[in-house]
Image (tube, rainbow, N blue to C red):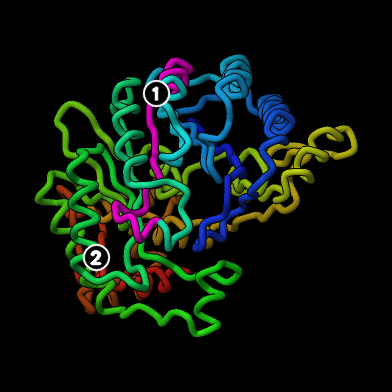
Amino acid sequence: MNYSLYIHIPFCIQRCHYCDFNTYAGKESLIPDYVDSLVEEIRIVSEYISPFPLHSIYFGGGTPSLVPVTEYQKLFNALFELTSIAEKCEISLEANPGTVSLPYLTSLRALSFNRISFGIQSTNARDLIRLGRTHTVDDILDAFVFARRAGFHNINLDMINHLPWQDLTAWENSLSRAVALAPEHFSIYSLMIEPGTSLHDWYQRGLMTPQDEDLGADMYEFTIDYLDRAGYEHYEISNWAKRDEENQFRCMHNMQYWLNQPYIGIGAGAHGYINTIRTENVSGIENYITRMRKRGEFRVGLPETPATIRTTKIDDITQMKDSMWLALRLVKDGVSLDRFERSFGKSVLEVFKEQVEELLHLGLIEWGGLKQSNLKLTRRGLMVANQVFLRFI
């Protein structure tokens, strides 16, 4: 069985105005101790999984590009010693454009990183300021050029639309400038105003008004059509990969999630899914370091480590529901009836006949694939995808 490994890097220069992730600003002095703790957690997991085959490794955050190359060297020494990394393993790093240089990216490429995801969010300078980003438009251009020169041939750009002050023309301009860079992949999300963020506080105080939902739908439809014309495959609700006959640029790591396959979460606040058990690690940086230093005080066994604070056993019906709504996110592939039956020993129609028939009748899903053996969202279903997913949650 191939595993994917997620490693959480919770350090940031400052929290963006929309961010509700497990991140902390001003704690960079803890990076060396944190990396030592990551190495220890990887070592513990390797004691229970042998061999430990990996076909994707993803460093997310936070801002992983704040970690010095010397610290990543320690992590990769441990990974090469304790795991079995596939020859074509996808190794991704999330990065803030304002935190990278050509020497830094060149060193990361030499360490085995082969995919980089820049959180640019927008190519409009006013958007970046209002979102609380620490980088500029010039930083985006510089970072992209540096990454190419460093040898990265698989670059993702993360973007956000449906901003409270944004109209359709502004989004069209922002996206078109990003497309001009010709990255291999786009991840594009509609802004969600989450409690505990600065944007949410501004809403509560009446300083901002909610964005129009119809405008959000217009932005989404424009994005789908524009990126299709620009040569990108819309393979997941919020993700597009460059069409290429020789290479595939779908994000292998995220495909592991959408296909409901096992993944291991390492680091503060990380989540995992192993042997039908979901895990959650302690969130705070200091708490994480302390628990890993005191590993002897905790009784652990796969999938738990000393950092684990919660485990949830997923029963068969929940696994089947998760497999349905996650795979329906794959707008090209959808749910494979063959894969579902191999996994659970039951057919999709045996378990979800009522839901499938209703959604087919409403025109929200359709049969697809060479043998009409896949269920996938229609264009109409894409626009109300959450309503489809609710049938399986």
Residue closest to the eye, 346 or 162? 162
Residue to which mark 1 is pinned: 102
Position of residue 16 measured from the top left corner of the image (x, y, whole percent): 51, 57
Real-space Cα separation, disc 1 to disc 2, in angstroms: 34 Å
Residue at 58% across / 45% down in the picture?
Answer: 12
Look at label 2 and name its amino acid: Tyr
Residue at 17% across / 63% down in the picture?
Answer: 222
**SS under mark 1:** helix
**Label 2: few (<14), some or many (≥20) within 10 Å?**
many
Residue 346, numbered circle: none
- Residue 76 visible in image: yes
Residue closest to the eye, 143 or 321? 143
Residue 220, numbered circle: 2
**Label 1: few (<14), some or many (≥20) within 10 Å?**
some
Q: Is residue 328 above or below residue 229?
A: below
Q: Residue furthest left?
A: 229
The answer to whether 270 appears left or right of 238 in the picture is: right
Residue at 45% across / 32% down in the picture?
Answer: 100
The answer to whether 144 appears left or right of 33 in the picture is: left
The answer to whether 182 appears left or right of 38 in the picture is: left
Look at label 1 and name its amino acid: Leu
Q: Is residue 339 magenta?
A: no
Magenta region, residue range: 106-128
Q: Is residue 333 above or below residue 182?
A: below
Q: Are marks 1 and 2 in contact (CB under 8 Å)?
A: no
